[in-house]
Image (spheres, rainbow, N blue to C red):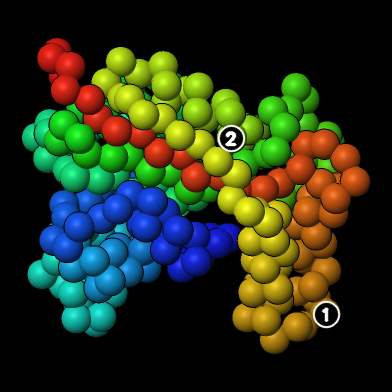
Amino acid sequence: MAPGGLLLAHMLAEELSLEVGAKVLDLGCGRGQSSVFLATRYQAQVTSLDLWISAEERSHRAAEAGVGPRVTALQGDVRRGLPIATGSFDAIFCMQAFHCFGAQPWVVTYLASLLKPGGKIGIAQGCFREEPDRLPDLFADTGGWHAEYNKYHSTDWWRRHLSASDKLDAVTAREVPDGDILWEDDILYRCRRADWRPDYLAQCAWLVRHVLHGQLSAPSLTHCIVLATRNNRVGG
Ligand SMILES: C[S@@+](CC[C@H](N)C(=O)[O-])C[C@H]1O[C@@H](n2cnc3c(N)ncnc32)[C@H](O)[C@@H]1O
């Protein structure tokens, strides 16, 4: 999983106050570990959507985990629309993915329309503590990883972005306590998986530089959780 892993997934799911059997869209779910987590821990009926990772891989993973009947896997770009009726979901769960596609206001409005009135959208992801005017050059080196820092914003930017939708109310946004540590933990996780091979440590240097940068100067990498509730206003 991306930085934060199951810890961040747990924090987001708890903030969404998921009820047993809730209908949840796991948006930008990657390899689908979070879909299995939601189906297992909350017995959620999960629609698991990702662009890069095939639906077959995720269905297989869910079946292996014994939650196949509770996970419907789809592959595609959320911006092209989903074969799903408006007002379908109790919650949209989006971890480490919203920045990839969510910065345009119409995407927020579309996603809000998929929620039942009172349903919640929750976003948990890497962000900058300060809204950057211009990214320092060192963030251009991402070691070949699809980091997309140019799409990162501050916690408050995301709060204002979701608040601008007339379909969403009660928008809250907070920085995850010690959210920078989730980045450090990601470095340790990657290195452990690579058995601390020196060549791999060298390959990770770019991420170490990004995390260290934030210890001394802005912008600094951290994580945020943003929540909003679908209102009852007509027209959606
Ligand atoms: C950094 S990964 C995070 C995956 C997973 N949520 C996690 O936390 O490990 C971002 C994911 O967003 C997905 N994604 C990017 N753009 C998307 C889009 N337009 N529609 C659906 N998924 C998208 C990618 O396929 C990728 O798997």
- Residue at 59% x, 51% y is 176
Disc 1 element: helix
- The answer for how far apart the CA atoms under marks 2 and 1 are is 35 Å
Relative depth, front residue between 57 and 93? 93
Mark 1 residue type: Pro
Whether pointer 2 and pointer 1 mark residues with C-beta atoms closer than 8 Å, the reply is no
Q: Which mark is residue 155?
A: 2
Disc 2 element: helix
For label 2, the crowd category at 10 Å Cα-Cα, with few meaning under 14, some 14 to 19 and many 20 or more, is many
Mark 2 residue type: Thr
Residue 138, quarter of the rendered image: top right
Q: Is mark 2 within 8 Å of ligand 1?
A: no
User: In the picture provided, is 54 more to the left or to the right than 123?
Assistant: left
- Residue at 16% x, 52% y is 23
- The x, y position of residue 150, in whole percent, is 65, 33
Q: Is residue 35 above or below residue 113?
A: below
- The x, y position of residue 83, in whole percent, is 13, 39
Relative depth, front residue between 177 and 83? 177
Mark nearest the camera among 2 and 1 is 2
- The x, y position of residue 182, in whole percent, is 64, 61
- Residue at 25% x, 30% y is 230
Relative depth, front residue between 70 and 73? 70
Q: Is residue 110 above or below residue 214?
A: above
Q: Is residue 86 above or below residue 56?
A: above
Indicate the quadrant containing the C terminus: top left, top right, bottom left or bottom right.
Answer: top left
Q: Which residue carries the number 1 mark? A: 198
Residue 43, quarter of the rendered image: bottom left
- The x, y position of residue 178, in whole percent, is 68, 56
- Residue at 63% x, 80% y is 193
Decide which of tag 2 and tag 1 comes sooner along the chain. Answer: 2
